[in-house]
Amino acid sequence: MRLRSINALKDNDCLAKAIYNENGQVLLHKGVVLTKGMIEKMKAKGITFVYIEDALTDDLYIKEGVSEKTRQESIHTIQSNFRTISEEIVLGKSIDMDKLEPSFSSVVKNILSDIRENKEAISMLSDAFSYDTYIFRHSLNVTIYSLALGKKYGLSEKQLEELGMGAILHDIGKIAIPEKILNKKETLTDDEFKLIQEHPEIGFDLLRKSHTISLLAAHCAYQHHERIDGSGYPRGLKGKDIHLYAKLIGVADVFEAVTGNRVYRNAKLPHETLELLYSGVNTLFDKDIVEAFAKTIAIYPVGLEVTLSDGRTGVVAKQNGDFTSRPVIRVTKEKGKEVAPYEVDLMKTLNVTISSCETSLSQEEAS
């Protein structure tokens, strides 16, 4: 299987993994031959990357970040609970977060269980799910990334559960922001941007009233947009004044947002987004957290089409533990000509690096 950006797909590409909606229903089955219309519909549904069939790579094993079952159950819970909260806000009712806490807690524990069993770097570009509302997908993915990062960072079981609850609820305040503003394609007005910047405080006020949800989770919602140089919001906190959980979630939040399609821009690949995070080290983000995150996620996911520094091209065939920037590459072309596939381990061939990724094609280049 080869991993392709939604913008690099072409007519007659054959889908290698089914695509599901947020209710676990199949939208497109494995083996479907794609058409331009199907590709446009996938874009509209927020799909960023898909796997296509390829005879040279059909044996590659794709390890999911979490199981399909866990993802479907988790997104159903998030969707149901968030909509309940939204409806109560509209009706002016008092919101009982204590009643919802057990189901959120169950989601966190299930994700943690999957992450413990997953010994490889986390890759979610292979999770081909579409969601009608961005906040559901984002909340789930940020939770997965945050828990994987927290595990790599050495947090205890109790700390991971606290972190997970903070992550799954970090954007709960956006429930009170009109969707037309959250999903606006055009540049936000100053007033609209200020309204969006209120969501950490809204989330904090909502969560701190709960008797069963930790106050730390409320502070995760409050602080996940704070940055160590004081340039964040809502309070402009600096360094040690920002809780560790909020710092971890902040990194996961940015990574998920940038690697996912949004209405106002296309998704970036993990290695491009990691460069963005590194550019903010010691100003926006703690260096040790970004370095831990780099060992947590698959910078170059299995199936990704790459070009090596010596001109050879191929696909990522296998990860190399914590050394996520140096995977095993299955070479399929030399000097632009197809060759019998063979593998190069970049941990053993240190004079060769990945120079570019084929899925970085823009929409114009792909058409």
Image (cartoon, rainbow, N blue to C red):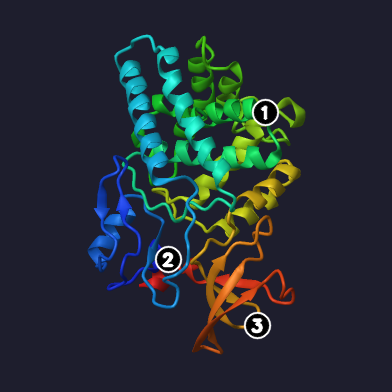
Q: Amino acid at mark 1?
A: Gly
- CA–CA distance in space, label 2 to label 3: 22 Å
- CA–CA distance in space, label 3 to label 1: 46 Å
Q: Residue at x 74, y 73 (%)?
A: 350
Q: Residue at x 65, y 47 (%)?
A: 293
Q: Crowding near pointer 2: few (<14 within 10 Å), some, many (20+)?
A: many
Find out whether the residues at labels 2 and 1 contact each other: C-beta distance under 8 Å: no
Which is more toward the observer, 132 or 50? 50
Which is more toward the observer, 228 or 117? 117
Q: Quadrant of residue 246?
A: top right
Q: Amino acid at mark 3?
A: Asp
For label 1, the SS is loop
Residue occupied by mark 1: 236
Q: Which mark is residue 310?
A: 3
Q: Crowding near pointer 1: few (<14 within 10 Å), some, many (20+)?
A: some
**Where's residue 337, x and y in %?**
50, 90
Q: Earlier in the sequence, mark 2 or mark 1?
A: 2
